[in-house]
Image: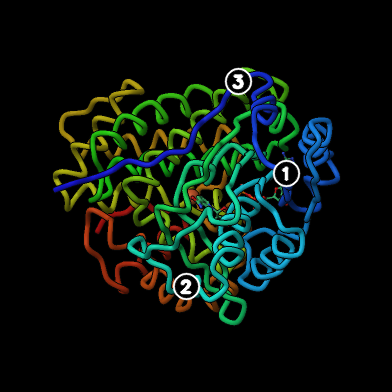
Amino acid sequence: MVWWFAVPKIVFGDDALSELEQLVGKRALIITDKVINKLGLAEKVSDLLCNNQWATAIWDGAVPDPKVSTVKEAAGAMKAFGADWIIAVGGGSVMDTAKAAWVLYEKPDVELEALTPFDELGLRAKAKLICIPTTTGTGSEATKAIVIRDDETGRKFATMNPELTPDIAILDPEFVVGLPKELTAYTGMDALTHAIEGYVSVWKNDFSDGSSLQAVKMVFEWLPKSIEDLTDLEAREKMLVAACLAGMSFGNSQAALAHSLGHSMGSVLRTHHGLSVGMALPYTIEFNCTESEEAAAQYSELAGLIGIREKDDVATSMKFAEAIRELMVKIGSPTSFKEAGVKKKDFKAGLEKLVEFAMMDSSLTMNPRNTDSNELRKLYKYMFDGKRIDF
Ligand SMILES: NC(=O)c1ccc[n+]([C@@H]2O[C@H](COP(=O)([O-])OP(=O)(O)OC[C@H]3O[C@@H](n4cnc5c(N)ncnc54)[C@H](O)[C@@H]3O)[C@@H](O)[C@H]2O)c1
Ligand SMILES: [Fe+2]
């Protein structure tokens, strides 16, 4: 069987942004959101290019958990400007907006939800893509994935295509120094979830494994440090790298159950992506390890990286899930719906939709344990109270 592993050119470290001085082209459209634009981060990119005789424009209409309609607006801006480079400056929502809009800019007839990994899109006839992350979690700058929200149903759908892997990812710590505490915690949990799910997904491979192992080690070491001291530049840079490594892993293997549960939470309850998948992660480890010997062995290998070893793989996996909860408590990321402030009545009202959307999510197929809607309902109920999984 032939496999391949796709990553962008990754530029990292102090002053990574200066990579733009080497760029060949004429017209760069910067895709961002209003928060990032206000912080002056898009302008920083624009100024550097303008000094090098580029024509630039900033489109700042991206919104958290991008909708199809927003993506279409961004594609319209690309067409109106005639961009030959698209530069996304922002978190996962901005990067996914840029990636998806790029598809529509090049191929206006594509229906995003119907996009498959096997479609030959012929991107790059008009423009290439650079991603500059301003959060330390999604790894979207290194993946071929996009997560978009349907305007009518509100359902977030994840899809992918190899051509969507950005051309260049620029990891410049200057772009994440101001990331607030809560977002640092939530996006850091997204990175950890990618690294762990990438390691147990049924599409795992030796290349994704290597990226996951390093990312797990780095998140446990550097996420608490980046929360303790928000100005710790080394911790910020390490988390940028860890998030990108985790993206390289799951982008080339796949995410699993925690992402199905998390996407659905984002759709129905509008909770932040990293908060959602991070909260789900320990429950899914407890759920998977008792039925899949392979997954238990894989979780045990990861647990070994942080010095956990119990009498067998299942016990080690359970302890690993607990260690993840301890990390979440330390950094202030909720471990249950209750802790996240979700009201019982809202949870009850949304439960059937949560289950329905999670069952439809593409990440479910790559989970090491098969499941059904009854189990997903039960998982959510346990997650509401913070109860450990025993089924
Ligand atoms: N395509 C992929 O591979 C992939 C992977 C994981 C997640 N995602 C998607 O990414 C989205 C989540 O992205 P995210 O977690 O990066 O958050 P986000 O992009 O949704 O941003 C959340 C908020 O943080 C603000 N923000 C971003 N950077 C900031 C900074 N440096 N300082 C201050 N505020 C800042 C944004 O303006 C926004 O208001 C979700 O839609 C998720 O489904 C995609
Ligand atoms: Fe994620």
Which is closer to the viewer, label 3 or label 1?
A: 1
Q: Residue at x 41, y 48 (%)?
A: 281
Residue 55 drawn at (x, y percent): 80, 45
Is residue 227 among what the camera can see? no
> Which is nearer the N-term, disc 2 or disc 3?
3
Residue 374 position by quadrant: bottom left
- Report whether 121 appears left or right of 149: left
Label of residue 26 in the image? 1
Amino acid at dot 1: Lys
Is residue 51 among what the camera can see? yes
Q: Residue at x 42, y 64 (%)?
A: 380
Asked if the residue at tag 1 contacts the one at tag 3, i.e. Cβ–Cβ closer than 8 Å, the answer is no
Q: Which residue is mark 3?
A: 13
As rendered, which of 371 and 9 lies closer to the eye?
9
Q: Residues within 10 Å of mark 2 (few under 14, many from 20)?
A: some
Residue 33 drawn at (x, y percent): 75, 53
As rendered, which of 364 and 93 lies closer to the eye?
93
As rendered, which of 20 and 250 lies closer to the eye?
20
Asked if the residue at tag 3 contacts the one at tag 2, i.e. Cβ–Cβ closer than 8 Å, the answer is no
Dot 3: element? loop
Q: Residues within 10 Å of mark 3 (few under 14, many from 20)?
A: some
Amino acid at dot 3: Gly
Dot 2: element? helix
Is 232 situated above or below 66? above
Q: Which residue is mark 2?
A: 113
Q: CA distance from mark 1 to mark 2?
A: 32 Å
Residue 201 drawn at (x, y percent): 28, 49
Which is closer to the viewer, label 1 or label 2?
A: 1
Q: Residue at x 50, y 73 (%)?
A: 110
Is 344 situated above or below 193? below
Is 246 situated above or below 257? above
Label of residue 387 in the image? none
